[in-house]
Amino acid sequence: MSTRPPAGRRAGAAPPEPAAPQAQKLPPHIIVLAIFLIVLSFGFGYGALTVRADIATPVASGNVACSPFAVTQGESSSAIIDRLQQQHLIRNALVAKIYLKLSGKTLNVKQGSYCLSPSMRLQDIINALSASPAPTPSSVIHVNQLAPA
């Protein structure tokens, strides 16, 4: 009984090594999805940092003098916040509106003039607008006006 080596193999030769498993290629849509999720996560991270800066950091650093900010009768909170951004007192009107909504705060602003500065944080501006407006020069009574002439 003679044992013959299998076809294609010489007698006395070592058995062939099993083939190394080939790495499976990922489908293109999985690669695109992974890249999209990575970019999205960086976007959310950057967005969160930007929103935090919009809320916690004033527009101007240092001590900038306040300037009068007039609110007219019947002006909506949304219009007031938009004007705050236009006058460079807050960074982002949309962030301010969302902040008010999420924090449960309301902007109860009375007609009048307010002293606001770009060096005030968003929270400080909201607090200032929620307080009574600064008296106007026509409503201030000077002491010498009360004294008899």
Image (tube, rainbow, N blue to C red):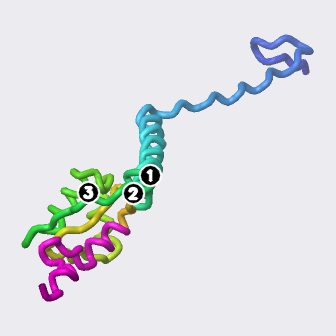
When the figure is inspected, residue 22 is found, relative to residue 56, above or below; the finding is above
Q: Amino acid at mark 3?
A: Ala
Q: How many dots with numbers?
A: 3
Range shown magenta = 124-149
Name the residue beneath numbered marker 3.
93
The disc at residue 119 is 2
Residue 14: x %, y % from top left: 88, 19
Q: Residues within 10 Å of mark 2 (few under 14, many from 20)?
A: many
Asked whether the residues under the numbered discs 2 and 3 touch, taking CB atoms below 8 Å apart as contact, a structural biologist would say no
Asked whether the residues under the numbered discs 1 and 2 touch, taking CB atoms below 8 Å apart as contact, a structural biologist would say yes
Farthest residue to the front: give it: 149
- Residue at 35% x, 73% y is 103
When the figure is inspected, residue 3 is found, relative to residue 32, above or below; the finding is above
Residue 114: x %, y % from top left: 24, 68
Q: Amino acid at mark 1?
A: Ser
The quadrant of the image that shows the C terminus is bottom left
Circle nearer the N terminus (1, 2): 1
Name the residue beneath numbered marker 1.
61
- Residue at 45% x, 47% y is 46
- Residue at 26% x, 59% y is 67
Asked whether the residues under the numbered discs 1 and 3 touch, taking CB atoms below 8 Å apart as contact, a structural biologist would say no
Would you identify the image quadrant in which residue 7 lies? top right
Locate residue 11 relative to residue 40 in the image: left or right.
right
Circle nearer the N terminus (2, 3): 3
In the image, which is nearer the foreground, mark 2 or mark 3? 2
